Amino acid sequence: MEGNVINKDLLRETLAYIEAHPEEWDQTKWICESVACFAGRACLLSGDRPIFDPKWRFEAMRVAVGELGHDVGVRRRATDLLGIDEWQADDLFAQKNTLNDLRRIVAELCERE
């Protein structure tokens, strides 16, 4: 999307959290108990609450946002919170990403503006 302002602070905060708490990071899980991928962690750091459903094997694929608890998919919410487009989200949220990949991608995104 044109006109997006990349949320560099949240990008850096999310990466710093993952680096400080690697045991709580799993790039293959949106949000599962205390473990989350980059997208899931960005949502949690923004105050969103995970919505757990047993049909998803106890993985939260949606989050409740704000006082009214409006629910949104983790990917959509994180993309919006971070101010990135769909291509950038594909790159950042890829399951194959290592911690070094996340560091590189965050650095590249923060250099763009």
Image: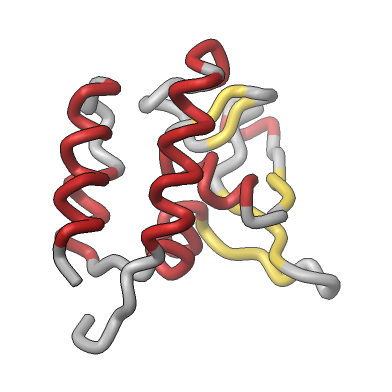
Task: Tell me if residue 79 comes above or below residue 52 in the rendering.
Answer: below
In the image, taking residue 16 as reference, residue 60 lies left or right, namely right
Counting from the top left corner in percent of width and height, residue 44 is at 64, 46
Rendered residue at 57%/34% (across/down): 31
- What residue appears at the point 25 percent right and 88 percent down from the top-left corner? 3
Judged left or right of residue 28, residue 31 is right
Say which quadrant the C terminus sits in. Answer: bottom left
Residue drawn at point x = 29 percent, y = 66 percent: 84
Residue 67, placed above or below residue 34:
below
Q: Position of residue 8 (x, y in %)?
A: 37, 60
Position of residue 56 measured from the top left corner of the image (x, y, whole percent)? 57, 33
Foreground pick, 54 / 75: 75
- Closer to the camera, 112 or 60? 112
Tally of numbered tags: 0
Kindly identify the residue that appears in the image at 44 percent across and 22 percent down.
Answer: 19
Residue 61 image position (x, y, % from top left): 54, 45
Image quadrant in which you'd find residue 1:
bottom left
Q: Quadrant of residue 87?
A: bottom left
